[in-house]
Amino acid sequence: MHENAGESPPGARKSLPDFDSATLVGEESEPGGLAELPARLARLGMARKRTEQMGKYLLLNVAQQPDSGRFALIKNPGPEASEQDLAHFAGGRLLTCSTWLKFRHYETVEKVRLHDANFCYQPKLCPVCALRRSARNLGAYLDALELVQGEWLDAMREDPDLPPLLYYMVTLTVRNGPDLGERMGHLRRAVKRMTDRRRQALSGNGWGCTEWRKIFGAVGSYEVTNRGKGWHPHMHMLVVASDEIDRFMLKREWEKATGDSFIVDVQEIDASDEEKLVGAFVEVLKYSMKFQDLSMADNWRAHLQLRGMRMVVSIGCLYGVKEPPELRDEDTCKGLPYEELFYKYLPETGAYTLIREEKITMLDRAKVRSETRRKGERNLIRRQHSHEEIVQAASALATALAQDPPADEATFAQLVAPAAEDPA
Ligand SMILES: [Zn+2]
C-alpha cells in the first residue's frame, strides 16, 4: 500500500466542488436552453477539476509515473494486474476524460443537448461521469414512476377501495468500520435479507411478516462516506408504498437484519408537491461517492473495493428500469437544424472554453447523410474482395504512399476496384 494512503494531498479538498442536489437537477434529462449553458459548463468544469486532480494523484502517487506532463496510457489491465498498473490505467483515463464537450443548440425549440464527449466511464472515481450517470438514471426512474402512477390511477378508478400511493424517503445505515469491503458486504446482506422477506411475505405462504411487504416499488442507492471516523456505507431509498409504513416496526426489523445497527430514517413525502418528489429522487440517485467528503486516497481505496459492484437497487414496480448506458443527453430534437458548440477543458483555467461554433442547416445535414451513404457503399465494395486482393491493394497503396503525398480513402477504393472493371 502506498505511504500517502489515508491523507489527502495538500490543497485538494479546498477546490473540491460541492455536489449538492441542485447540481444534479441542472444536469437532469431536460437540461434547458442556451441561457442555462454557462451554469452547466461551470458545474461540469468544477467536476472536471477533481477528475484532473484525481488522475494526477493516481499517476504520480500510486502508479509512480514521472511527471513529464505527457502520461502514456496503458491498455486494460487484466485480473492479475498490480495496484500500480490499475492506478496507471485509471489515472490515464481520468486525465483524458471529458477534455472536450460537444453541444448542439437547437435554436428553433431553444434547447441545448450534450451531444458528445470523451467520457472515461469510471463513475466511482470521476465526478463528471458520476454526474452524468446520475442524471441519466434520474431521467429513467422519473419516467418509470410516471408510468407506475398512471397505472395506479387507472386501477383506483376501477377499484374505489384502493388507497392512493404513499411516498417515503428511507435511509438505512450500518455502524461505521475500518474495513469498507466488510461494512459494505454487511449492509448489502442486510438489504437482501429484507427484500427476501418481502418476497416471502407477498408470496402468500404466511411466512415472514414485514413492513417491507407494503413497498409497492422502490429504488435505492448505496452511498459511501468517510469523514475520518471510519467507513460509513448507507443506503438512501425512495419507497412507493401501498400502505402506511410503521417507523418503529421498520427500525426493529432493520436491527434484526443487521444485528448491530438500527439507524433508520423514514420521512414521508407529500406526493401532491411534485418538486419535493423529484427532489427525493435526486437525493436517492445523487452519487455513490461523496467526493467532497473523500480524500483522494480514500476515493481510490473505495474504487478498488467496490469495483464492478452495482450501486443502484430497485424492487417491485420499479424493478428492471434500464440504466441508460450512455452518458450523453438523450437527444429529443433529432432532425431539427442546430448550431454545434465545441468546448475544450483548459487545465490552466480549470474551465471549459468555446473553441468552435458551427451552424448546421438542413442542407448540411442532407450532405452529411449522403456522404455517409457513399462511404458505406465504398465499404461494401471493399468487403466483396478476397483477403489476398485487399493485401495486394494495400501493398500497392503503401508503395504509392512512399512516393506520393498521403492518399485518401477514394484512392484506396480505386486501388481495390473490381478487376472486371479494370481496363487492363
Ligand atoms: Zn470520467
Image: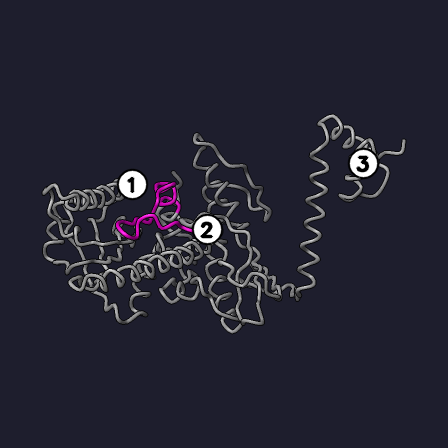
225 shown above or below 391: below
Tell me whether circle 1 and circle 3 mark residues in contact (CB < 8 Å): no
Q: What amino acid does circle 2 point to?
A: Met
- Secondary structure beneath label 1: helix
Give the mark nearer the N terminus: 1 vs 2. 2
Q: What amino acid does circle 1 point to?
A: Gly
Which region shows up in magenta? 300-326
Label 2 or label 3, whichever lies nearer to me, is: 3
Q: Which residue is mark 1?
A: 181
Give the mark nearer the N terminus: 1 vs 3. 1
Label 1 or label 3, whichever lies nearer to me, is: 3
Q: CA distance from mark 1 to mark 3?
A: 59 Å
Q: CA distance from mark 1 to mark 2?
A: 22 Å
Q: Is residue 403 magenta?
A: no
Q: What amino acid does circle 3 point to?
A: Leu
Would residue 45 be seen by someone viewing this image from the given angle?
yes
Name the outermost residue toward the bottom.
35
Image quarter hosting the N terminus: top left
- Secondary structure beneath label 2: helix
Q: Which residue is mark 3?
A: 415
Query: Looking at the rendered structure, which numbered label has been put on residue 54?
Result: 2
Image quadrant assignment for residue 137: bottom left
Q: Nearer the viewer, residue 308 or 65?
A: 308
Q: CA distance from mark 2 to mark 3?
A: 48 Å
